[in-house]
Image (tube, coloured by chain):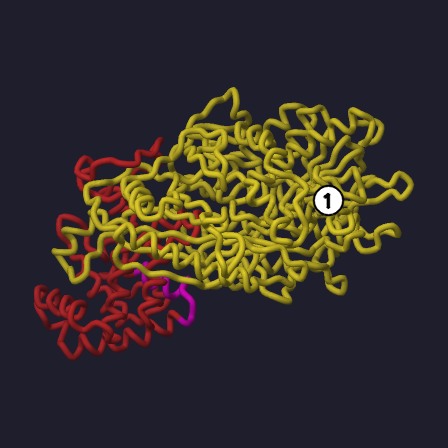
Chain colours: A red, B yellow
Amino acid sequence: MNRRDILKYTAMLTGTALCAPLTSAMLSGCSPQPVVATAGSATPNLHFFSQDDFQLISHIMDVILPKTDSPSATDVGTNLMMDQMFGVVFMPDYQAKFADLFADLRQYLATNKFAELSKDQQVTLLQKLELEDKQSKAYWAYMDIKQQTVAYFLSSEQIAENFLNYLPIPGEYKPCVSLAELGGKAWAI
Amino acid sequence: MGDINKPNHFDAIVIGSGISGGFAAMELCTKGYKTLVLERGRMVKHGEYPTAHMDTWDLPNRNKVSLEEREQHFEKQDRLNWWVNEDNKHWINKDDVNPYNEDERFDWIRGDHVGGRSIMWGRQCYRWSDIDFEANLKEGVAVDWPIRYRDIEPWYDYVETFVGVSGQAEGLKQIPDGKFLKPFPLNCAEQGFRESVANVYPDRVVTPGRVAHLTEYNPEVHKGARGQCQARDRCWRGCPFGAYFSSQSATLPVATETGNLTIRADSVVMEILYDATTKKASGVKVKDANTGEILEYTAQIIFLNASSVASASILLNSRSETFPNGLGNTSGEIGHNLMDHHYGMGASGILPGHEDDYFQGRKPTGFYIPRFTNIDEESKQSGYTRGFGYQGSARRIQNNPEGLVGDALKAQVFKPGPYHIGMTCFGEMLPYHENRMYLNFEQQDKHGFPLITFDAKLRENENKLREHGVKCAVEMLEAAGCTNISSYNSATAPGACIHEMGTARMGRDPKTSVLNQWNQMHDVPNVFVTDGACMTSSGTQNPSITYMALTARAVDYAHKQIQAGKL
């Protein structure tokens, strides 16, 4: 997958590709289905990933967005959403490309003994991949996971309603307001 | 005026209930005509918008339709990959039950239901000017428009007042100012962009999109089921507030109140019937979409508003001894000169700064940059004729800074990211006789209607224009100091802009055009075509407000002719 493809898929997920006024509906982002199984569940019903790959992706997602005073990525089902999107929505060529890239990421993490590292070391390893190993297949797989993690996280109901500014019926449009007055937080939708 | 002894007789029949059909129905009903509106799709009443209040997490697959469903039902409708979504798919025809043929790819994107595409239209409203109306004549392209701006100007005033168009007066000759409600203002980043562009390119004006939304609701003027815009930006799902203009929210309720309106949904018009004795259309033949029953309705006048391609197909299928090639087709032009706007080109970038500048609410539009090339001698281009405009917006994207992982990312991720400016270029398409749709009488759909077949494509002028459109977009982003600028030029097929038009053009000469200056068929004086089929050229402007103005004008003309005993 080349950078253009990544950008295309990322744009589709984050709604940053504004190709017409009608795309505005896409700006409302993405969200998972109600979470019935989490990363902690023994065997969630999966659409696309093997159980092993799903566990690894879940692990990566919670390193990217760990539990703090707000939920972790998988607490709001980003892993299940990504599996569902790959299994139910995405085109076969994208599925195949991602599977190919992800094989390299899995190898990269195994080589670097990701599972055995401390939490801080895991963060450092992913940072190194993002900043220093650009253009490797493992990098592109990781960046895709990271983009999807952030997108599904921010558009989950729990995060949108509790950790972002959520206003389903704004009533009017104000073109310029101070971000500080909005608590420094993004709009959920 | 309706004859109560003939339950199938009306003063007027309107074929189609979309943006122009609804308008025709309202104008006819308010003038006292017992009017039958025939709609091939199902009934949808105002408020019947099942996804209107859903958040994205209430919709499956973060609002994307599953691959299986797309492949089964929306193979052509979803070619753009952003159009068919969980929140609007019930407004979009299923390809497997609504087939058409293509000699050349044509994305015929539509929805059969009462209201038609007035439910999910883009709501952008820009007036045409004489730059558009005179272009064919000046360039020797196709045929001359039989009208000029002065002919349509009062009708723009009339329909804009009723529709409610928000916008900002700019005094531009290429898109004349209208009767505007207050605009959805540019946000801080867009305002900065406007100023940066104006500094470097004074002829390029970044103005708030002009849209059919009630920013200043006035129940005395905005009749029907209208209301104040709530800035939700969920318009294409159908608006329970009636804040944007649609047949459901505006024209059909007003028509209903007169007591003169009859709407018959699930009614597929197979042909318009011609009476060689009176040399007029006598009525229409309809097939009930559910029962298959064939019905005939008669009327004094007929307004054909089924949308450009469907209207042409009905005319082509209305064959008689007098008109063996289709009703009113002595010119042979019906189905030809098929146009759309074309896009799939533009640019985007990150606008630095404005860190503390945010907005509140979700306006249902962004900015518009009207055409600025080939509008006068100074802006004349050597490589192509006509021009292009842009729609775009600046919004803050998700905050996912490079290299941040874990707690460091968590500390940033709830903040808005930088402003991203995206702009899409929309180009004019010339009217080529070779670009056409026609009927394949060897194949029929489930109603027994011959299959519509498309044979149209972009040509040299369009492709040259596209290159310049992309170049100018990048120039403007550079002028604003954007970073990470990327551009694209991936031509869309005709139809993809959902502005198809031209298949029964207006003109001065019955030998080369189908309609006269009043949208009246040269050959059949009691049939009026006032949807996109009537267009003699495509302009760069989003066309719906022009269809509405021409419709109101044509009804007024027909009424005066009838009153004078001439029709």
Please say if B144 is above or below B550: below
Which quarter of the image is occupied by the C terminus of chain B?
top right
Mark 1 belongs to which amino acid? Answer: Arg
Q: Left of B113 or right of it: where is B289? A: right
For the residue labelled by badge 1, is the local secondary structure a helix, a strand or a loop? Answer: loop
Position above or below: B522 against B6: below
Mark 1 Cα-neighbour bin, 10 Å: few <14, some 14–19, many ≥20:
some
Q: Position of residue B518 (x, y in %)?
A: 70, 37
Relative to B324, is B411 on the left or the right? left
The image shows residue A37 at horizontal and vertical percentages of 29, 58
* Region rendered in magenta: A80-93
Query: In the orientation shown, which residue stands out farthest toward the top?
Result: B220
B89 left or right of A157? Answer: right
Q: Can see residue B69?
A: no
Extreme-front residue of the structure: B377
Q: Magenta span: helix, strand or loop, mainly?
A: helix
Residue at the (16%, 56%) spot, across then down: B409
* Residue shown at the point (75%, 53%) measured from the top left: B316
Between B503 and A65, the one nearer to me in the picture: B503
Q: Is residue B230 above or below residue A38?
A: above
Q: Is residue A114 left or right of residue B37?
A: left
Give the chain of mark 1.
B
The percent position of residue A148, horizontal first and vertical second, equals 29, 60
Q: Please name the residue that numbered disc 1 is placed on.
A: B508
Q: Position of residue B392 (x, y in %)?
A: 39, 48
Which is nearer the eye, B339 or B142? B142
